[in-house]
Image (spheres, rainbow, N blue to C red):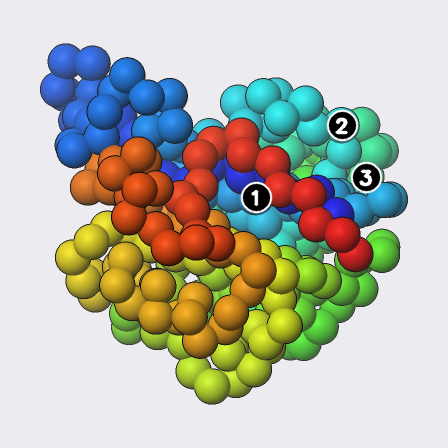
Amino acid sequence: MKVTILGCGGSSGIPIADGTPDGNWGVCDPSNPKNRRRRVSILVESSDTTVLVDASPDLRAQLLDARVRRVDAVLFTHAHADHCHGLDELRGMTHARSGPIDAYMDDRTRQALTSRFAYAFASSRDSDNLYGPIFQDHVLNGPVEIGDVQAIPFTQGHGPETTQGFRLGPIAYSTDAVSLDDAAFETLQGVEVWIVDCLRDAPHPTHSHVEQTLQWIARVKPARAILTHMNHQIDYEDLRQRCPAGVEPAYDGMVIDVAV
């Protein structure tokens, strides 16, 4: 199984486009290309199945850079803009496959996306729309088989809201999480690679921070842990040097190969 980190940045990416000349890099060294971060998303590829997790606003460039040939399904973690506002960029993939892409999400996310992007989903588009839907939407209430990939969702606390983490065979993905319950940790047991939320050093009301994420990793004990959703307050090289063995920060374009 191959996993590509399409983006590992916070909701604004890095550098932040805030009017600062050359963008706002925060504490990140702009000379290190691993500090240039697009919004978070991953691509999971097995022998015959390609699954995208989230559709970031940077998705077109991410798909082109990763030379993605097909997308069989999309898993949405939640409906925040940095995780779904690139979904229209998948229209070209529907042309390539001559039909909509299966999209899986919890009911709350489905309600939000089919309202915000009604034209894109089979269940909510107008019948007289000249263009076909981008997605065939499905409510995800438990494990689902997508080709030869099994996706097991688990609930994560995200401040006053919740998101879905996913276990996909030997890997797991936990973005936008500030709390995990025992059921989540049970799902994570035995995972080989865990890609996990780590916004910054200081605690945050909706995202995990470095100290807490390292505590989570010590509990799960994956063979390899990769930190993602890092904002402009985390420099790649500084964090890399502080990480214990088996833990490392992600960077855009990072590829992880895992035996199945």
Mark nearest the camera among 2 and 1 is: 1
Residue 84 location, x and y as percent?
Answer: 48, 45
Please indicate, yes or no, whether residue 59 appears anywhere in the rendered image.
no
Residue 179 location, x and y as percent?
Answer: 35, 74
Mark 1: which secondary structure? strand
Q: Which mark is residue 42?
A: 1
Mark 3: which secondary structure? loop
The C terminus lies in which quarter of the figure? bottom right
Mark nearest the camera among 3 and 1 is: 1
Looking at this view, name the residue that lies furthest to the top: 21
Q: Residue at x 55, y 64 (%)?
A: 222
- Disc 2 + disc 1, Cβ < 8 Å: no
Task: Check disc 2 and report the residue beneath it.
Answer: 69
* For residue 221, above or below residue 83: below
Mark 2: which secondary structure? loop
The mark that comes first in sequence, 2 or 3, is 2
Marks 3/1: CA–CA distance: 22 Å
Task: Check disc 3 and report the residue beneath it.
Answer: 99
Image quadrant where residue 167 sits: bottom right
Residue 170 location, x and y as percent?
Answer: 69, 61
Which amino acid type corresponds to the residue marked 3 in the rendered image? Gly
